[in-house]
C-alpha cells in the first residue's frame, strides 16, 4: 500500500500497477488502471503526503485506512484492501471513505 502510494506520488503508474492483485491485472491494462486512478483517486497522483490512520490483518487479508493530501490540498480518505498472493501483499481494492468529494461518491474501485 505504501509503495503504491509512493509510486503514485511520482505519477509512476507502471510501478503502482505492479502492486495490484493478479485478478486486476488480468482484467485491466496499464492505461485503464491509470484512467481509473485519475478519475476515482486524483488526490493520489502527485500527492503532498499520505498518512496511515488504521490497519488490521485477518488471516491472509489486510486493511489499511489512509488519508491522502492531494497536490491541491484536498484530502481523500480511503481503505486499502490487500491479499497475500505468493508471499506478497497485493492491492485487491481501494474504497473511498466518508466524507467523499463529489466525484468520488460515484466511483468505488474494486480489483
Image (cartoon, rainbow, N blue to C red):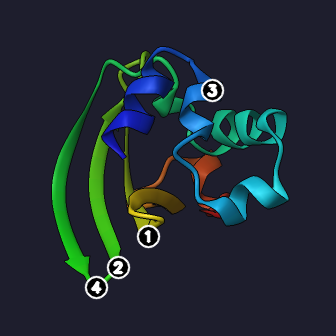
Q: In this view, does 104 lie to the left or right of 57?
A: right
Instruction: Give the mark toward the camera: 3 or 1.
Output: 1
What element does badge 3 sit on? helix
Taking the image as drawn, is residue 77 in sight? yes
Total label count? Answer: 4
Q: Is residue 95 above or below residue 11?
A: below
**Residue at left offset 44%, top offset 37%:** 4
What element does badge 1 sit on? strand
Position of residue 96 measured from the top left corner of the image (x, y, whole percent): 47, 58
Q: Nearer the viewer, residue 39 or 111?
A: 111
Whether pointer 1 and pointer 4 mark residues with C-beta atoms closer than 8 Å, the reply is no
Residue position marked by numbered label 2 in the rendering: 60
Position of residue 74 measured from the top left corner of the image (x, y, whole percent): 39, 30
Instruction: Give the mark toward the camera: 2 or 3.
Output: 2
Q: Nearer the viewer, residue 86 or 69?
A: 86
Position of residue 81 measured from the top left corner of the image (x, y, whole percent): 43, 66
Whether pointer 2 and pointer 4 mark residues with C-beta atoms closer than 8 Å, the reply is yes
Amino acid at each position: 500500500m505504501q509503495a503504491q502510494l509512493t509510486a503514485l506520488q511520482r505519477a509512476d503508474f507502471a510501478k503502482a500497477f505492479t502492486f495490484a492483485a493478479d485478478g486486476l491485472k488480468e482484467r485491466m491494462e496499464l492505461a485503464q488502471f491509470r484512467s481509473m486512478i485519475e478519475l476515482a483517486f486524483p488526490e493520489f497522483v502527485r500527492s503532498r503526503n499520505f498518512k496511515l490512520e488504521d490497519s488490521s490483518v485477518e488471516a491472509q487479508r489486510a486493511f489499511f485506512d489512509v488519508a491522502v493530501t492531494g497536490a491541491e490540498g484536498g484530502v481523500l480518505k480511503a481503505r486499502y484492501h490487500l491479499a497475500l498472493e505468493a508471499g506478497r501483499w497485493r492491492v485487491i481494492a481501494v474504497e473511498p471513505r466518508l466524507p467523499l468529494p463529489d466525484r468520488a461518491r460515484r466511483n468505488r474501485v474494486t480489483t
